[in-house]
Image (cartoon, rainbow, N blue to C red):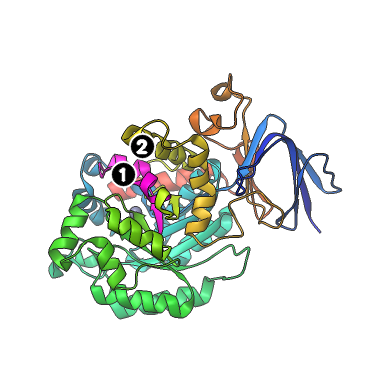
Amino acid sequence: MAETLLRGADVVVTMDDAGTELARADVLIRDGVIAAVGQGLTTTGTSHNVAGCVVTPGLINTHHHLYQTLTRAVPGGQDALLFGWLRTLYPIWSRFGPEEMFVSAQVGLVELALSGCTLTADHLYLFPNGARLDDTIAAAGDIGLRFHPTRGAMSIGESSGGLPPDSLVEREDAILNDCIRVIDAFHDPRPGAMVRVGVAPCSPFSVSRDLMRDAALLARDKGVMLHTHLAENDEDVAYALAQFGCRPGQYAEDLGWTGADVWHAHCVKLDAAEIDLFARSGTGVAHCPCSNCRLGSGIAPVRAMLDAGVNVGLGIDGSASNDAGNLIAEARQAMLLQRVSLGADKMSARAALRLATRGGAAVLGRDDLGQIAVGKRADLAVWDVTGIESAGSWDAAALVLAGPVRVRELFVEGRQIVGDGRMLTVDIAALIARQNGLARALCS
Ligand SMILES: [Zn+2]
């Protein structure tokens, strides 16, 4: 029986239904699960003094393209809208292979871990030169984060009227067969699962209607979740109207892409009827505030979604459209966007932190995560609030309003991944050197 005690936190932000925050409290972890929360707890196992810290549930990232850490700030894509940005990057991505996928994923995962993230989804939708979803799953296993990789796909290349080059698209039967392979090999439906696989054609503008429908049938047959990009910007909506004769929400509904086992990234341009559809059907949203700003896509109607009862989580989106990978910074950005759009009382810091924890857990179907409560998995972020960025604050909301933006300690399934602000599972200097070597080769 392995026990770890986090002792004497300034505040434990439980994120339970009542929003309980416990002052000068302890959290006891036993065998990867939260065994007790309160004051005066003891253990015969390992004890960590977390005085001067705020403890929160580990943050949950619901949308990412980890491979894109290798194409940050690419000059031709820095100031482009979505479609132009994609056309700039596709030729570079077509030169990736297994090593690029593995190393870039590790870089993205480390960034996430240091910013308090304990579970991330990933959307990998191109597999050039022998790359496989397996490469990213191996990367996450080494780093120690909980991982929901989704097997993405593109099937309509330029010669068929699509956006990606033909070299990056796959045959639809091969896509479905590989989805089955990775689900059978890696998906774990049990509580506490470290890996859950999803099915995720890239977007309505890069796969056929048939593949969207078949992917939904396959996912339901296998009991896994569905994910894609939807209604990201005005171009995206115009494409749906022109090609499908309907808005993105209608397209999704017609093809079986609504329900509690579905989550869509962005949804910046959902209208009131689509928000109602998502609420009624339990369809989730990955809100990606920094990416939406970076690509000038707009401000997602998150306040309206939450008021309607839509499950909303936060997403980094790719590191080529963010270009950072800091999840606590996304919570701050989500809060700021709703405020600049609607007013300062429309999203509190605590509400933003809830999106990053409970919201993400609900979107990804993880009722075993997202809060600090007895019986939940021990995914915990420990934030040191004795530093300069916190000086002068006395409320836990400062975590989103002021900082810090890096954790002091991070636990996943009770295992310590970050200690004293440093990764314990990987040599960061060696990883950076490896990533920069790959980047140099790509840009040469
Ligand atoms: Zn994306």
Q: Nearer the viewer, residue 267 or 444?
A: 267
The answer to whether any part of residue 95 appears in the image is no
Residue lying at 62% horizontally and 66% vertically, measured from the top left: 191
Q: Give the label, 1 or 2, closer to the camera.
A: 2
Q: Quadrant of ligand 1?
A: bottom left
Mark 1 or 2 closer to N-term? 1
Q: Position of residue 66 (x, y in %)?
A: 42, 53
* Marks 1 and 2 close (CB-CB < 8 Å): yes
Residue 357 in the figure: left or right of residue 386:
left
Q: Is residue 287 magenta?
A: yes
Residue occupied by mark 1? 292
Residue lying at 45% horizontally and 80% vertically, measured from the top left: 221
The answer to whether any part of residue 226 appears in the image is yes
Q: Position of residue 10 (x, y in %)?
A: 69, 32
Task: Specify few, some or many for label 1: CA neighbours under 10 Å numbering under 14, 14-19, or 20 or more.
Answer: many
Q: Determine the CA span between mark 1 and mark 2.
A: 10 Å
Residue 275 in the figure: left or right of residue 85:
right
Q: Nearer the viewer, residue 131 or 311?
A: 311
Q: Nearer the viewer, residue 370 or 350?
A: 350
Which stretch did the figure color magenta? 284-306
Residue occupied by mark 2? 337
* Amino acid of disc 2: Leu
Task: Specify few, some or many for label 2: CA neighbours under 10 Å numbering under 14, 14-19, or 20 or more.
Answer: many
Compared with 52, 193 (above or below) is below
Work out which residue is located at the far right of the displayed protein and give it: 44
Q: Position of residue 378 (x, y in %)?
A: 67, 53
Residue lying at 48% horizontally and 46% vertically, measured from the top left: 355
Badge 2 marks a residue whose secondary structure is: helix
Compared with 149, 325 (above or below) is above
